[in-house]
């Protein structure tokens, strides 16, 4: 079965070849040199590592701050204590939360959540689009739910989830295998390369190099390609953090997102 990378990058390669090919009976002129255009780079923040924090939840008892990202319909809660020490818990749906994280389950039961990620002293929620609240109203309501859950002693992860955790070496080997066999060969046509920097607990840290560094489509590649491939081979992978300095990218493949390539 074709991977996401072969489908997307081979298609782009074919489209580029078709757009530059000339009919057999038409003389091809040498292109004139064009002035260099300034590069427009997209800066991506690693999940949970952004430096802007908006106090969207009133303090009291347990201190919580919330960072709201309207473009992604996401709110990240930052707590004054560790939720998970050394591990992270990814819940793409309520069924996953039932099996792994009582705290994430409380979020799903409050309504409106599509995914929940618990990592260190943070909890990130992406909404499912069904609610009518503003993202700030949702953050305030959910902040109260989370505060009460923590005061009631609700655990961030189940003992069974933590007890069945693969070793860092096992997760690293699984991720490196898919990088070598699927991801890097797939993005090679765009001069991209992905490096697995390290695995801590079940959290993976990567950098995106070559044409992927600063590329306008790098967030799509990260979310739809890399993350999906990683989770397919390592189901207990928690957070995936991109440590790339995308502002320093010298040769991004796309300086602007191509038409039809949705984020």
Image (cartoon, rainbow, N blue to C red):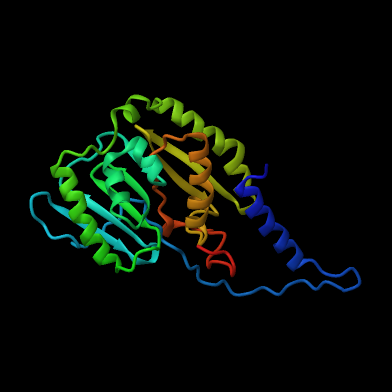
Residue at 29%, 69% (x, y): give it. 134
In this rendered view, identify the residue nearer to me: 256 or 230.
230
Image mark count: 0
In this rendered view, identify the residue nearer to me: 200 or 43.
200
Left or right: 142 in relation to 89: left
Left or right: 192 in relation to 67: right
Left or right: 7 in relation to 44: right
Q: Quadrant of residue 262?
A: bottom right
* Residue 231 in picture, x, y percent from top left: 48, 40
Q: Quadrant of residue 177?
A: top right
On screen, residue 98 above or below 216: above
* Residue 70 in picture, x, y percent from top left: 35, 66
Q: In which quarter of the image is the N terminus?
A: top right
Residue at 43%, 43% (x, y): give it. 206
In this rendered view, identify the residue nearer to me: 110 or 195.
110
Left or right: 208 in relation to 128: right
* Residue 96 in picture, x, y percent from top left: 39, 40
């Amino acid at each position: 079965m074709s991977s996401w990378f072969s489908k997307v990058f081979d298609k782009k390669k074919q489209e580029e070849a078709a757009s530059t090919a000339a009919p057999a009976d038409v003389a091809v002129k040498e292109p004139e040199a064009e002035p260099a255009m300034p590069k427009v780079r997209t800066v991506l923040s690693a999940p949970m590592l952004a430096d802007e924090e908006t106090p969207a939840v009133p303090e009291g008892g347990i201190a919580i701050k919330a960072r709201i990202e309207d473009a992604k319909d996401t709110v990240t809660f930052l707590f004054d204590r560790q939720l998970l020490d050394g591990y992270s818990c990814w819940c793409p749906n309520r069924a996953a939360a039932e099996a792994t994280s009582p705290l994430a389950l409380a979020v799903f039961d409050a309504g409106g959540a599509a995914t929940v990620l618990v990592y260190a002293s943070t909890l990130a929620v992406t909404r499912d689009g069904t609610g009518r609240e503003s993202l700030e109203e949702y953050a305030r309501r959910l902040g109260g739910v989370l505060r009460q859950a923590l005061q009631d002693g609700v655990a961030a992860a189940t003992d069974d989830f933590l007890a069945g955790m693969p070793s860092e070496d096992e997760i690293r080997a699984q991720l490196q295998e898919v990088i070598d066999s699927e991801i890097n060969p797939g993005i090679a046509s765009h001069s991209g390369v992905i490096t697995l920097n390290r695995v801590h607990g079940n959290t993976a840290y990567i950098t995106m190099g070559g044409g992927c560094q600063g590329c306008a489509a790098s967030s799509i590649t990260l979310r739809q390609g890399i993350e999906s491939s990683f989770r397919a081979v390592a189901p207990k992978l928690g957070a995936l953090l991109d440590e790339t300095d995308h502002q320093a990218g010298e040769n991004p493949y796309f300086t602007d997102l191509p038409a039809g390539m949705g984020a």
